[in-house]
Amino acid sequence: MSLFDALGFCWERAAIPQRTPTYSKERVCFRLHRMLPEFVWDASVLEGNPFTYPEVKTLLGGVTIGGRKLSDQDQVLNLADGARRLLDWVKCDDFVPDKPHFCALHALIARNEALEWGHFRGEGQETGYTHDVGLGEAGRYSPLPTVPGAPELNRVFAAGITALNELPSALERGFAFLLFGALQQFFFDGNKRTSRFMMNGILMSAGIDAISVPATRAQDFNEKMVRFYQTRDATEMMAFLLDCHPDATAIRALNAL
């Protein structure tokens, strides 16, 4: 099975930089630790969460915010818990882009928000409901149906991971994992945010800084994701993710040589 067949989408591989500045794992983890409030706020804005950046900083400091919904507060805290777990894994060389880590992150990030969390659709009590993804004026995107035991989702995931592991570039591998998880919708909800965390686990494990999609680019992110769902072409989204990388200028310069 080819790479694109296994993942369910394609992209212009020649457009993806193969050389990236790398650092020690301690360095990349320290950076994410220092920017944790910003990272969590950016991720929450992509979910439509109304918490402001100062409110996120206050909440992560242990002080609750009056006048905000508990569900919005819990979403911010879940994102922070997921980021901390990811940091722990990378620091201890325990991160692997596999199903157990994917599901463990989802159990934290989508806790009390998704219909079920911590396992693929069909592996829990709900075995018949299949959600879809709203694309606004473009209609809706329907993933594989939910069936008991999730045999097809597990087959697709296993084939996709095998294909991803053959990519020599951690940057390309990380980008592709995010879009793989977003397209296949392995969970009832929280697929994009959990897949972004997995992308960053792949990057940081290779000594590459994590990517946070800036809150100011949330609309741009959503518009490009709609086109990705429509076309199954990830070239535009991968270019966008590269633009969001803190070393984007250096990466382009390094690959222009």
Image (cartoon, rainbow, N blue to C red):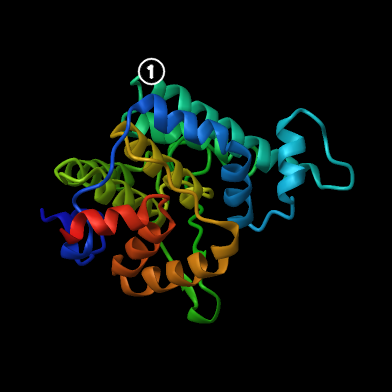
* Up-down relation of residue 10 to residue 151 (above or below): below
Q: x, y (%) of residue 156?
A: 26, 48
The residue furthest right is: 67
Quarter occupied by the C terminus: bottom left
The residue furthest bottom is: 137
Residue 5 visible in the picture? no
Residue drawn at point x = 74 percent, y = 51 percent:
52
**Snapshot quadrant of residue 37:** top right
Instruction: Look at mark 1 in the image and give the residue it sits on.
Output: 92
Q: Say left or right for 245 vs 21.
A: right
The residue furthest left is: 1
Q: Secondary structure at mark 1?
A: loop
Residue drawn at point x = 48 percent, y = 34 percent:
31
Residue 102 visible in the picture? yes
Q: x, y (%) of residue 215?
A: 59, 58
Q: Nearer the viewer, residue 247 or 211?
A: 247
Q: Say left or right for 74 vs 83.
A: right
